[in-house]
Amino acid sequence: MLGTDDQGREILTWIEGEIASGVWPDYLRETESVVSIGALLRRFHDAIRGFRPPPNAVWRSGANRWKIGYVVRHADIGPGNLVWRHQQAAGLIDWDLAEPGEAIADLALAAWTFLPMAPDAAFRRLGFSQQPDLRGRLESLCAGYGGVEPASLVRTSYLLMQSERKRLTELGNARVEPWVSFRAAGQMQLIEAALAWMERDGMDLLLTA
């Protein structure tokens, strides 16, 4: 965001490309796509790592204060917020939920969303004819990012799911938007389904070579 105009409207930059919504385009179901997601997140985190927000910065989520080792993470990595160009991840948009945190949490959210870490029904909704090679996609995401072990990312993703369930409960109960709308749209059910899948099948599928 570049600022606001005299009517209080946000002035935004433009990133050329496309976003994926609903059924994924074919390229997003290919393993190479998650390599480019990992590489994009690495470029973003490397670029922002030296930035420290001002002490009075206010985060929409009411996130914790700044700690040594934190970055300003995007915190909303998903198909609707990722711009693709020439079938490569080219940019991130929609920074409303940005907050201080560990960089690995962004990669964990990408793993949750883009492997995806979800029951079989979710695969079919995204256009997969069968369960994808989850272990291969996980390793490719880690390779694109660099320096992260697949097993560590799986554990971080599982903890992130639990954290997001807690946040959705607390902020939803406090009537804080957009978490009220997230809950009304069924986000809690999706998180619960992902957690149940991880506990039942996902951990074994992702951690067994």
Image (cartoon, rainbow, N blue to C red):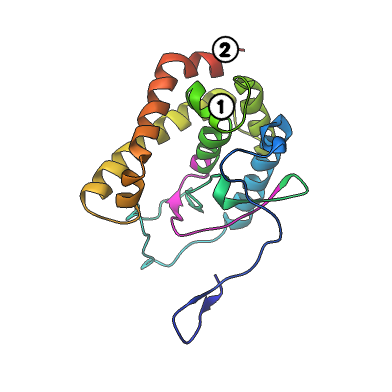
Q: Earlier in the sequence, mark 1 or mark 2?
A: 1
Say which residue appears at 60% left-offset and 22% top-offset.
Answer: 134
- In the figure, residue 161 lies in which quadrant? top left
Across and down, in percent, residue 174 comes to: 21, 52
Which residue is drawn at the image coordinates 46% and 64% (left, top)?
A: 53
Q: Is residue 162 left or right of residue 13?
A: left
* Residue span colored magenta: 89-105
Label 2 sits on residue: 208
Looking at this view, is 206 or 94 the one in front? Answer: 94
Whole-percent x, y for residue 144 in the image: 69, 37
Residue type for callout 1: Arg
| SS at circle 2 | loop
Secondary structure under tag 1 reads: helix
Q: Amino acid at mark 2?
A: Thr
Is 199 a magenta residue? no
- In x, y percent, where is residue 72? 49, 55
Left or right of residue 48: residue 198? left
Q: Is residue 175 above or below residue 124?
A: below
Q: Tell me if mark 1 has few (under 14), some (14-19) or many (20+) residues whose alpha carbon lies within 10 angstroms of its own.
A: few
Q: Residue furthest right?
A: 86
Tell me, for residue 178, which label it has, or none: none
Q: Nearer the viewer, mark 1 or mark 2?
A: 1
For this orientation, the residue located farthest to the left is 173
- Exactly how many numbered labels are in the figure? 2
Q: Position of residue 42 (x, y in %)?
A: 64, 45
Rendered-image quadrant of the N terminus: bottom right
Q: Residue beneath label 1, please?
A: 124
Q: On the image, which quarter does residue 127 sit in? A: top right
Q: What is the crowding at mark 2: few (fewer than 14 residues within 10 Å), some, or many (at least 20)?
A: few
